Image: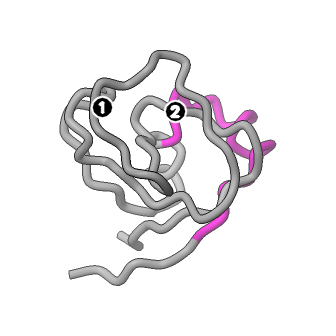
């Protein structure tokens, strides 16, 4: 089992990456987030948001606890500090 690490998501790097979601961007950085639907329905990709703000262009249906976000259907509004796993 992989160890959880904290990693930064730089807003300007995300914007220039061409990724459509934070999940795509996180995967491109060789970090792992578990997922199923990739569309905000299942909640399998719930990830801890340590600092920063995200936006949901389309409101997800999955349950999200305080301090978490769904990277499959969100985009950063600021630089982020998140918990993820190295591949």
Q: Is residue 17 magenta?
A: yes
Q: Residue furthest front?
A: 66
Q: Earlier in the sequence, mark 1 or mark 2?
A: 1
Determine whether, in the image, residue 57 is placed left or right of residue 80.
left
Q: Residues within 10 Å of mark 1 (few under 14, many from 20)?
A: some
Q: Quadrant of residue 82?
A: bottom right
Residue for badge 2: 74
Q: Position of residue 55 (x, y in %)?
A: 60, 30
In front: mark 1 or mark 2?
A: 2
The picture places residue 87, in percent across and down from the top left corner, at 35, 69
Q: Which residues are magenta?
A: 7-22
The picture places residue 26, in percent across and down from the top left corner, at 50, 52
Quadrant of res 39: top left
Residue shown at the point (52%, 41%) measured from the top left: 22
Residue extending farthest to the top is: 58
Above/below status of 48 relative to 22:
below
Specify few, some or many for label 2: CA neighbours under 10 Å numbering under 14, 14-19, or 20 or more: many
Q: CA distance from mark 1 to mark 2?
A: 10 Å
Residue 86 is marked as none
Q: Which mark is residue 38?
A: 1
- In percent of the image, x 46 and y 61: which residue is there? 48
Near-viewer residue (59 or 5): 59
Residue appearing at x 36%, y 43% in the figure: 64
């Amino acid at each position: 089992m992989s160890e959880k690490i904290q990693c930064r998501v730089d807003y300007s790097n995300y914007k220039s990456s061409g990724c459509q979601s934070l999940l795509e961007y996180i995967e491109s950085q060789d970090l792992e987030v578990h997922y199923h639907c990739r569309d905000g329905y299942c909640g399998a990709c719930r990830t801890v948001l340590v600092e920063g703000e995200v936006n949901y262009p389309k409101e997800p249906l999955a349950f999200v606890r305080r301090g978490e976000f769904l990277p499959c259907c969100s985009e950063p509004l600021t630089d982020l500090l998140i918990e993820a796993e190295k591949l």
